[in-house]
Amino acid sequence: MGACAALNCTSTDRIKATTDIAGPGVLYAYIVSALLAVAAVAFGYLSDSLPAWYLNETDEAVIASFQTWLPSGKNVAPLKWLYVKIKNVLCFGGPSSPHRKLSRQQRQEVLTRFVLTLSDQQLATGLAILIAAVANQCTLSVWEFQLAFSLAWFSSTTHLATLDCLHEYFLEHGAVHNWRVLGMVALLLLLMYSLVMNLASVDTTLPVACTFLYFGDRGLYDQTDLIISDILSISLTLIILTWQYVVRIRWSYKNKETKPTIVERTLFSLRTRRFREALQPTKKELDLILEEAAAEHDSTSRRRELERIRISKGLQYHWLVAWRASCTYSESFLSLGPMLCFMISFGFTQLYVNRWHSLAPVDIDTSMSVGQIMPLFLLVLPPLVAAESYYGKSGATWMLIDC
């Protein structure tokens, strides 16, 4: 805190923003990486390139419906003919190799490599910018701190979106997954702290550390307490943010198999006590029997529910159909999307308003320095990783056109 020894909490006419936070290269790199991540998740879902156990009947219906809208082979025949001609020209008249179609498992591996690289980038950059902002509270202005928070929010929500595609990878790499979860928890705590500081800060030209001098008041020279609407606003935002992290972390640890609940285990133990005393099965055998019994119970319940819908009529029929559709949707992969879309939109809006529509007088150096160019070049890594995986799976050579 040596830099805070001479802390100046006097408002200034203009803010000279650091390019490491407000520079164009940094901003565009964050935006492009977020768009790439969202596009990769959407492509993996709609192209049926996710593991089958991620999806339920709602997802399968949506994917099948989307793929029926795609152009048929007859409609794209002219484009295929043109593509073959271009390949022949680029191969200097020689015959080009036929297009290699990847299996679903191979598509999953390519998508996982691509999304994993993007996911780790988003987590690392979110942590880096918030740690740097918190460590430099004595010199960073409130405006720069707010922009850093907007970038970190944007990065964290994009990272949450990528987790849905990496479920199987995390189960297979448990130790590394735990380290990633620790990073997510650290990022969540930093986001919560930054969000509170943003609410408490009023004058955007002051250093962030000055906020502690009037924390809980509406300004440095205004001793009026914060109004209840501001407190409710930040509380709701914190609840939504924390809930999304809890849901995603819990989802990432969910096993492929549906494990029996504590209630089911207790009932099973009570009902089979006599048989267990007589047959004395091992613990592994008991677990297998219990899982099979739970699966049979789920199947029976589903059959009864569908039969009840079949024999119902009128308003009852529509109500039961709507109820089942709602329950099925809530358990689908698709149901994870709306809240994430809201959070990403919220983050983009914050970033846009704070950076391009801020009322604060700001001077920003827009020259493309090393700190601006480096984040843009890092965007090349995910496509390179995906290309390496693709060409390794398809057996093709490292060329844009496989001759």
Image (cartoon, rainbow, N blue to C red):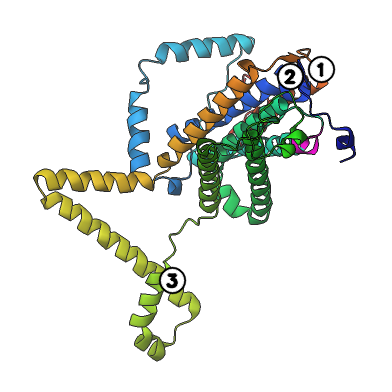
* Residue in the foreground of this view, choosing between 129 and 120: 129
Q: Quadrant of residue 114?
A: top right
**Where does label 3 land, which residue?**
288
Q: Quadrant of residue 296?
A: bottom left
> Callout 2: 10 Å neighbours few (<14), some, many (20+)?
many
Which residues fall within the magenta stretch? 132-138
Query: Is 245 on the left or on the right of 76, as rendered?
Result: right
Q: Earlier in the sequence, mark 2 or mark 3?
A: 2
Q: Secondary structure at mark 2?
A: loop
Q: Is residue 122 above or below residue 325?
A: above
Whole-number angstrom distance, CA of label 2 to CA of label 3: 58 Å
**Where does label 2 land, which residue?**
23
Point 62% across, 22% down: residue: 354
CB under 8 Å between callouts 2 and 1? yes
* Residue in the foreground of this view, choosing between 338 and 168: 338
Rendered image: mark on residue 369 = 1
Q: Earlier in the sequence, mark 2 or mark 1?
A: 2
